[in-house]
Image (cartoon, rainbow, N blue to C red):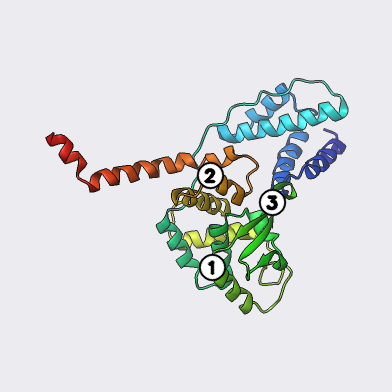
Amino acid sequence: MDREIIARYRNFMEMRGYSYTTIRNYLYIINDFARHYKIPDEESVQEYLEKKNITKNSRATQIRIFRSLGKFMQKKYKMQFDLPEAPRMGKTLPVFLSKKEVAKLLEAAKDNTRDFAIISFILYTGVRVNELVNIKTYDIDLQQNIVRVKGKGDKERIIPIAKPLSALLKKYLSERRHKGKYLFESRFNEKLTPLSVQLLVKKYAKRAHINKHITPHKLRHTFATLALESGVSPITISELLGHSSLNTTMKYTHVTNKLTEDAVSKIINSTGFEKIAREK
């Protein structure tokens, strides 16, 4: 495949506001494909995927990447070829932490003020890891307890900060020796990378003996799930998370359905309904 096409497709994704992580992941797959094939048509994509041992959902994701690239090539270069069929991805429930697991994770990180603040910030604001590492010190107002976050497509949103989290951030900033540009920085006074935050979360999840694959995004899932469980409107949660569609937020209702079922059962059990109904 022509390297110029890939470079232009990258520019196209940047112009459309794709995140750095999305662009990186797309280009990794496309560059791997480009070593062996010229166009992402049905035959070449099928042959490429047959050589890989990947899950059904990963296969579906990669086909969507090739379809996106294919449509770009057809529109920009007037090339004609059959695009691969877009499969339906299987629905998987988001992985999230229980309240007890949240407490265990926070307990494991509390001796390191910066790390404790990072984990707490994701848990109680629901920001994406790419958003977290790009928050600058002037984006946060600890007098009004708000933070300005730039999300996907450079869309800005304001997220309120709970007073206990605000107090923790004040403590963290007062203890920080170097007054850096970004809210959270490395011990070398450099901007954190998404990978460094992922490794940080993984380290404390392991220390807390949490037997789940925990990532910053799973902490974002936790924020959404616990918010729904607490009765917060999906519309409000959608605004806080920066979702472009309410449908994205609604996937968490599948998780909270089980929680509401448990709540109904507890109410019935607490009133002795089953015994009374049986005696009727």
State the image coordinates of residue 70 (x, y, percent, origin top left): 77, 29
Residue 37 visible to the viewer: no
> Residue 234 bears which disc, if any?
2
Which mark is first along the chain, 3 or 1? 3
Q: What residue type is labelled 3?
A: Gly
Q: Residue at x 56, y 44 (%)?
A: 235
Q: Mark 2 or 3, which is nearer the eye?
A: 2
Which mark is first along the chain, 3 or 2? 3
Label 1 with label 3: CB-CB less than 8 Å: no
Q: What residue type is labelled 2?
A: Pro
Quadrant in the picture for the N terminus = top right
Give the answer, above or below, for where 131 lies relative to 243: below
> Residue 197 bears which disc, if any?
none
Q: In this view, does 82 lie to the left or right of 227?
A: right
Q: Name the residue under label 1.
A: 163
Quick one: 273 or 65, which is closer to the camera? 273
> Residue 151 bears which disc, if any?
3
| Mark 1 crowd level (few <14, some 14–19, many ≥20, 10 Å Cα) | few
Q: Which amino acid does label 1 sit on?
A: Lys
What element does badge 3 sit on? Answer: loop
